[in-house]
Amino acid sequence: MSRQQVLIAIRRALQGRHPTPLPEVRTSKGAPELGWDEFETALTEAQGTFIHPIGVDALAERIATITGGEHHCSGAAAELLNQPALSLPPAEVDGLPWVVASGFLAVATTGSVAVRADEVPQRLHLVLAENLILLVPADALVNDLWDLYGRIAPESLAGGYMTLISGPSKTADIELELVTGAHGPFSLTVIAYT
Amino acid sequence: MTSLRNRLDSALAQPSRVKGFDSRAWDLHSRRTVAASKLPHWEELRQRAAEIKAHTLSRLDHYLEQFADRAESAGAVIHFAADASAANRIVAELCQKRGAKLVTKSKSMTTEECKLNDHLEGLGIEVIDTDLGERIVQMLKEPPSHIVAPALHRTAVEIGELFAEQLGTPRGEKDPQLLTAAARVHLRPFFLGAEVGVTGVNFAVAETGTITVVENEGNSLLSTSVPELHIAVMGIEKVIPRLADLGVFLNILARSATGQRISIYTTHYTGPQRDNDRNRELHIVILDNKRTELLGQEDHARSLSCIRCGACLNVCPVYRRSLGHAYAWTYSGPIGSVLGPAMAPPGGEELPFASSLCGACTEVCPVKIDLHQQLLRWRGEMISARRAPRPSVRFLASLFRHPRLFRLAARLGTTALKVPWIRRRSLRSWQGSGTAQRHAPTPAKQSFTQWWRDRSRNQP
């Protein structure tokens, strides 16, 4: 069935009916600005860990403390930390103990980090490692999802991906008991940096 | 196919299984209640969501066209499918063009509706459902029992037995943590070896041509990221106008489904990812499959607003005692019952009668579908069209239309109910399933009509 046939079927179905109004976009304009404490609350609720802003020069050492030096850096994070970028095939990324990647925005009310192709071209790195660390600039926190989408130029999405990561991989499919590390990382640590 | 009544009876004949299922569904409902209460503007969000959906459906042709155009500009290939067979054919051809023998699929009720797995397997293409709950039911060769938690009807003990048999886990193991770890190891080679990834679509944004896929496990991201070909299957009703509208829907979806603020992974795909090393393709199959018929019925079009959260299932007293499978269709519970008469296979006209009309479903629906009103309207239409499933319902409808006959039947019925034996058996014969424990009360000495007449006569 062609596009036109489906569209004709829809128009026939809607014949004689008037469109209803579209509500305005909701924004948090005028609302008090939320801080990293709110982000931490949301992320912790989802079994994630948050490290409050540290200087960019202290990042490498802090990460090494968490990972015991057993980490690989993906994409822009490698550049930020002045370390070699992860370039292994998927089968070899699978099971790596730690991967460090960068996000470009964080959302306070949901504890989410927005990651896109610009910073993490190999999105497999986000799900194949055993544990994930996401770095996000301290001034990149927005209040809520409306703020997030308000900051994104629609045309910038084409040819890429954007994923909001809001905790470690999890499932409750067996008697609703929560288990982390379903298929993706067992843990998520978010570090904000200045 | 057996009748709905018989299927419900079969479910109720397993009281301990029903008790567990009921308890787990109610648990999901409780989580939803807590999560919703923490959002001070929850009702405002519901209202907005309802208005956005109503507007979108009223201009569905415009937004679908916009979505298709924008997605194509971003490099996606759009296919329209009139029905399930067409959708299956499109997906199969895409797989065969690639010579694919292994497909990984993340949770998609739309592909379940189409019976895509059966179709591909008939062509020698192996399909692995990668969501843990879906993989469990696939291994059991059963359909999912719940939109969000496909294996809700199964206990950890049963899943442990299944894994011991098929995955070699230790006999008697029932710890969900260890069973999940076993599933992770079991599914990894399929993820890494798949040639095609198939997903559903939670929302399709017309403004940008973006599809959004929401999940907690990471299986969808894996399914779309290893293979070069990603096929996304969506119903025509999944489109929303603006990127910003996701702010409304993402807030209400996870809270309604599982009680979370937001799902763990919310991935937006706008065309295939430009990748120097790989030849990525994104194909989006847009499915009608009788949705336009429902759209054409003004009384019922609103049911197309559904965002598949499962909240109505979790609160429904009938669904919670049905083990999920009694509906004998992809969609169960109240939403399954309002979609069923238009979209389900034969037997779907019974589904609106599987309800006590308590209205709890309407109260919890995040997009404010008037579910219990829709069920009542469907019942009226079934009776008018003489499609009501039980002769007793049609008989009662005739009785209510003839006042004298109704009064006579009431007098005879009241007299009969004075006989204890008849009183004990009366509800069972009218209602069937689940009323074995109920007895009709002893009727009053006078009916209200008689009392009122006597009172009116005696008043000065």
Image (cartoon, rainbow, N blue to C red):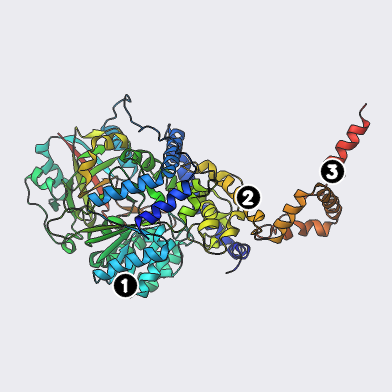
Mark 2 or mark 1: which is in front? 1
Label 2: element kind: loop
Judge from the rendering whether residue B384 lies leftward or rightward of residue B36; answer left or right: right
Q: Are marks 3 and 1 on the same chain?
A: yes
Looking at the image, tell me whether mark 3 or mark 1 is earlier in sequence order. 1
Q: Where is mark 2, residue-wise? A: B356
Dot label at residue B125: 1
Question: Is the residue A11 above or below the residue B437 in the image?
Answer: above
Label 3: element kind: loop
What chain does badge 1 belong to? Answer: B
What chain does badge 2 belong to? Answer: B
Quadrant housing the C terminus of chain B: top right
Q: Residue A64 versus residue A3: which sits nearer the camera?
A: A3
Q: Which residue is drawn at 27% across and 44% down?
A: B208
Judge from the rendering whether residue B207 lies leftward or rightward of residue A53; answer left or right: right
Residue B289: x, y in percent? Answer: 44, 59
Q: Distance between the residues labelled 3 and 1?
A: 67 Å
Residue B138: x, y in percent? Answer: 40, 67
Q: Distance between the residues labelled 2 and 1?
A: 43 Å
Specify whether residue A72 is in view.
yes
Q: Which residue is drawn at 87% across and 45% down?
A: B445
Residue B143: x, y in percent? Answer: 46, 65
Q: Residue B219 versus residue B338: which sits nearer the camera?
A: B338
Q: Distance between the residues labelled 2 and 3?
A: 25 Å
Looking at the image, tell me whether mark 2 or mark 1 is earlier in sequence order. 1
What's the amino acid at mark 3? Ser
Q: Where is mark 3, residue-wise? A: B447
Looking at the image, tell me whether mark 2 or mark 3 is earlier in sequence order. 2
Q: Callout 3: few (<14), some (14-19), or many (20+) C-alpha neighbours within 10 Å?
A: few
Label 2–label 1 contact, CB within 8 A = no
What's the amino acid at mark 1? Ile
